[in-house]
Image: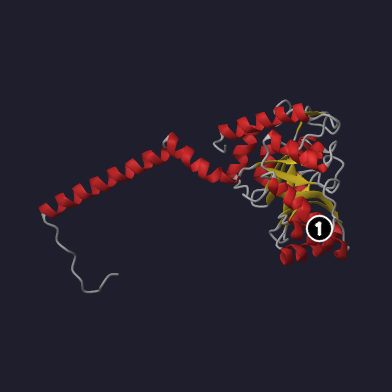
Amino acid sequence: MFLKNSQPEQSSPERKSIDRRTLMRHSLVGAGCLAVAASPIARLVAREAQSAGLKLGVQLYSLRGFPADQALKYAKELGFVEVEFYSGMFPLNSSDEAIRSMVAQVKELGLAISAHGVNGFTKDDAANRKIFEFAKKAGIKNISAAPTPDSFDSLDALVKEFDIRIAIHNHGPSDRFNKVVDVLRAIEGKDVRIGACADLGHFIRSGEKPVDVIRALKGRLYGIHLKDFAEMKENTRGVILGKGHLDCVAVFDALLQAKFPSDGALSLEYEENEKNPIADMRECFAVAQSALKKVGAS
């Protein structure tokens, strides 16, 4: 604050010398702080703090050839920390007792439920509500979804009421959510809890680069299906992570930059070799774990 009639303070040579020394000392301290902040160790510490939310789970559809109890044991043995259920293994019409039993079984194995889906939604609000009620009872935060255009008024109200996310899942070139722009248009103007579960494999089939997809969905990305395909076209074959068009290191780095939520669902999904996928899934897991270490997330 300046007073109208105040006079400027006169500085003595001694005062100027002190001021210069003080300024020099502060400048050196500031430069030192900047140097530390820019050092590899500091960057690693910052990255590790930022990446605390990257937990590798599995979409249990990958283990659909096994009963639920065996699939859960395999998920644990392979090293996953979270599971994303689908209705074939954890039915939406499960009784309260069956829900409690499944939740207890997952917890006993030291796992957590990250999501459930992919579930269809229409303008039928009562049917939509039943899915949300199921998720609430099971303690599920994310529902991966294939909603019809007329379902969004219902979903907008339900995500507010239940505080559960809807994550729109893409299914490739023949799907209404073919490109990332289709997802962005669908969620525009909707409650922030309506976002995306990006199946990176299907986006590859749609000719889109996984890292670009993640960047485009920043702030509304609640699920990832880690999946790789040999070619960027509709009809192609699934492959081990990294043997097609999926760069796991780049994907995880993009997720860190996008601040993927700690309670989101990061799920490996491997659809090949339905009857005996374990060896392939173990290889996929090793690729993913190596990538997580490279970005400082493991």
Residue 112, visible in the rendered structure = no
Count the numbered circles shown: 1
Mark 1 belongs to which amino acid? Glu
Residue 25 drawn at (x, y percent): 24, 46
Residue 196 left/right relative to 233? left
Residue 139's quadrant in the figure?
Answer: bottom right
Height in image: 51 above or below 276?
below
Residue 274's quadrant in the figure?
Answer: top right
Q: Which residue is mark 1?
A: 97
Residue 11's quadrant in the figure?
Answer: bottom left
The residue depicted at 18 percent of the width and 68 percent of the height is 7
The residue depicted at 60 percent of the width and 35 percent of the height is 292
Q: Residues within 10 Å of mark 1 (few under 14, many from 20)?
A: few
Q: In terms of secondary structure, where does tag 1 sit?
A: helix
User: Foreground residue, 111 or 288?
Assistant: 111
Q: How is the image coloured?
A: secondary structure
Residue 15 left/right relative to 275? left
The residue depicted at 67 percent of the width and 49 percent of the height is 264
Residue 170 drawn at (x, y percent): 79, 45
Residue 260 drawn at (x, y percent): 63, 47
Task: Locate the N terminus by quadrant.
Answer: bottom left
Residue 216 left/right relative to 133? left
